[in-house]
Image (tube, grey):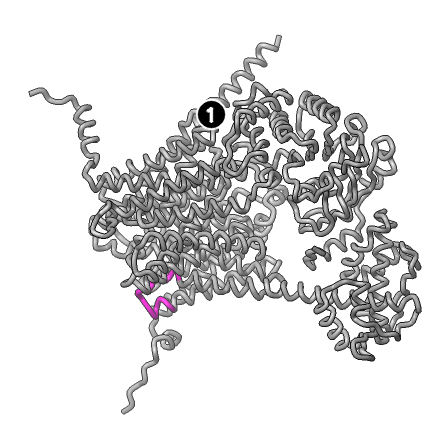
Amino acid sequence: MDPQPFYTAAIDGLFGSFPTDADSLWVMLIGSLVGASCALVGCFLILRRLSMLGDAISHAVLPGIVIAFLLTGSRNIFPMLIGAGALGLLTAFLTDSLHRYGKLQSDASIGVTFTWLFAGGVILISRFAGQVDLDTDCVLYGEIIFAPLDTLIIGDNEYGPRAVWMLGGVTIANLLFVLLGYKQLKVCAFDPELAASLGIKVALWHYLLMGFVSMTTVGAFESVGAILVVAMLVVPPNIAYLLTDRLGLMIGLAVLFGVLSAVLGYWIAYLLDASVAGAMATVSGIMFILVAFGSPSHGFVARQLAQRRAALSMAELAESTTP
Amino acid sequence: MSPETPPPIEVHDLTVAYRHRPVLWDIDVVFPEGKLVAVVGPNGAGKSTLIKAIMGLVPLASGHVEVFGRPARQTQGAIAYVPQRESVDWEFPTTALDVVLMGRYGQLSLFGRPKRRDREIARNCLEKVGMAEYAKRQISQLSGGQQQRVFLARALAQQTRVYLMDEPFSGVDAATERAIVALLHDLREQGSTVVVVHHDLQTVPDYFDHVMLLNLRTVAFGPVGEVFTPENLHKTYGGRSHLLSEVTERLRQKEWIGRQ
Amino acid sequence: MNEPTELPPWLEFFTFSNVNVAFVFVGCVLLGMSTGVLGCFAFLRKRSLLGDALAHAALPGVCAAFLLTGTKNPLIILGGAMVSCWLGALSVEMIVRHTRCKEDSALGMVLSVFFGVGIVMLTYIQRTGEAAQAGLDKFLFGQAAALIDRDVWTLGILSVLILAVVALAYKEFKVFSFDPEFAAGIGLPVRTIEIILATLIVVAVGIGLQAVGVVLMAAMLVTPAAGARYWTERLGVMLIAAGTFGALSGGLGAYISYLSPKMPTGPWMVIAATILFAISFLFAPRRGVLPRLRRHFRFRRRTAEENVLRTLYLLGEPFEQWSDSYSTSELLQYRSMPTAQLARTLNRLIHKALVSEPAQGRYALTEFGVTRAARVTRLHRLWELYLTRKLEIAPDHVHDDAEEIEHILTPELEQRLAALLEHPDEDPHARTIPGRLQPGESGA
């Protein structure tokens, strides 16, 4: 019997461990939808230097979700998306008001606003633990593992995991928003003064973006929890930012890296029997580090080489001109 | 300037006061059509503020601005604004051509995309500023002078007849400076009005037709030959009135909102 | 024999009969005090959210410490947390310095990725079913009730240490926070100060984790400082206020945790701190929102009063006597204002004995009123003269401006103005400027 060469055995072993059962595929799909929807709006968030506002919104939607639960007694998608999404907009508005009318500096405005909202949400959960289908830990890192079991039931038929429908809808909505509003979002991010002088309503587009960010965090909440949504909102866009200078390509790459984080993250979580959301964030972080070093255009190595080359050519120039 | 057409920019009793920034008092000036106007004054005199106030980017405590006879608020896009280079993050992922195309956005509808004609116009404008071969270059790779030219091309792409520029000559190399001056003179030949915040007093008589001497209020305004005198310069640069500063400070403390 | 009556729990707390409870309470108070004080420096350097990122970054360190040593010794856990925090702070700096990513992105990435790593470790530990790990998820939201005395000792000592360092290095921290470039310019070791401050924040985060939890630690570093800012312009006072707010929040959190042990402590501390913030934001004497609104309306009312006075003065001026009375419509001809406002203002002026109503619907200045009105008119005309003479603004433009300014010129400014203009008699419209006040007359 021919023994397999070690490398094919290793590769077989490695890929063999990749989970392909139905539940796993569902989870990976859900994770990919989270990654994709977050990347689409996350790009504009980071270009406008509002990452921490995104962090704030993803925390502050919690009380909205809990209240939606308590009021409707169910986990119906629409009340949650709309109710909690409105809370995200409220956060953006309160933060802005504290800054503008309360004359509080912007970083503190963010910090003060979202923390009490999130604290309120945690207290509500603790208090109404029985009636609300969330527990404090799940809030932080989600329960994506159970998502495939939670199917959408209309009438007598099952239509697949609820999360897929919800996140699929959110992803499509974000895609439409980015496509239709592309030039406004771009100008408002690049040069808000020019945008205003051209007649574009900068404030409107700001709140539209915040609204879509809210909706995205609510959609992703059950799957990956409050804090790891931030990872998906911020890390893949930054990876893309280090790889390209073209906005369109950046958005596409961000989506790609979001999906990669989901798939690879799930794989690692599967192997370690640990939190999927945590693994997704970890993988995205590792990819960021790799790109930060190795990106051909903006990576650390490339920059060092470019500096070295520039220094060399200066030296050559100096040599060639000295008699 | 014919008596029937209203002047490109008319500023009436403009007063701007907000915290930590220079105040503008009762600015009253009419910019004539088809001239190159320099706005000069010491640091903190309010030159940038004046430009921004005309563009509607800062709130006015009182007064109003008219563009070609109509209230400024109704004429968005009629003035092409070239801000200071520092106002923008040059590491934004976009090309030079893209930036110039943004100048066309005022003409496009809500969901409209730039058409081929818009791209042609954008390319033409890049050519006019000598940046045609940099169209696809990332803006982060451009030098200071090149960035300034891209901003100018963007303004040209708006295809208006009025330009407001905030220190376009600062920090650019000699070649770019010459190119910008040539461009300004071309614009004047075409009958456009260009108002430029300028920091270099030496070149005012060479480059500009009219000059506005500004230090919190209008010290003087008129043709360079008449107005650009040592006496007026002394009044402009001669130091701020202490009384005025103190009154300003008390106003700020009372958080004076203004009449409107 | 009488049985001793038992106090209800919410009162019994304050007897401190249970030493452990007392310890926990004191520990939380000290914790709140030290984080409140430290938060001021982060606040002044506009880096309030750094604490948020570092707190989240502590989680992998906590889990790693447990994984490696298998114990929950507070010092070891603290050590792990601090190492992890430090790595987080370093990562933020490296990202900002060596890539083109911006600071907010760096904070967001470090926050979420480190936390993600921590969650992976935490869930891994949970799944392996180690009994001792049961306490680890207390670190997420804090559980003051779970603090035992060695935890509290650590907490207490380190809090005191933080406060001591701040007290010792107060001058240096102060200069550094307000203007790092200036500090460097006068020879302060800026880099060292920065590292010390960052280390103190890391320590604060480390000790706060058990009580407040990873997720909400940020609030204890931001909210008390933000609230304190509304009360003062002086750093020393701000530190004391922030320390007090933090202490109160910490104490309240511990108290509620005692009353209902199933509730996590962190959120209650945050709510307490936010309530204190809201009070500051609304009521603080000079910078609070409500006092500002009140001042604004008072100023508007005074302005309306002085405008009416001046109108009455104008009406009587051609005849140089003010015993005639005028109707509201006559007044409105000279000065337009909403009728309701005019009515209210006239009532107030009558109340202040500056205006009288000799006949129904007709109003005149009293003697006091004449003096007051003369003064306001004087200020108005002096300012007009100033604008035309000194600033060379055309005479027909100055009226509106003077309308605003006349209400804020103090007597001192008035004297300087008159001196500057060499005690003029006529304004730009060739009207007489009413004379200066004689000693003994009051125009206020």
Specify whether residue C400 is in view: yes
Name the residue at 66% across, 49% down.
B59
Q: Quadrant of the C terminus of chain C?
A: bottom right
Left or right of A269: which side holds A101? right
Check residue C325 for magenta coloring: no
Give x and y (percent) for residue C165: 50, 54
Res C32 quadrant in image? bottom left
Which one is in front, A17 or A31? A31
Give x and y (percent) for residue C183: 61, 45
Which one is in front, C397 or C48? C397
Query: Which residue is denoted by mark 1 in the rendering?
Result: A304
Label 1: element kind = helix
Amino acid carrying label 1: it is: Gln
Left or right of C116: which side holds B79? right
Check residue C258 for magenta coloring: yes
Residue stretch in magenta: C256-267
Name the residue at 44% across, 36% down.
A179
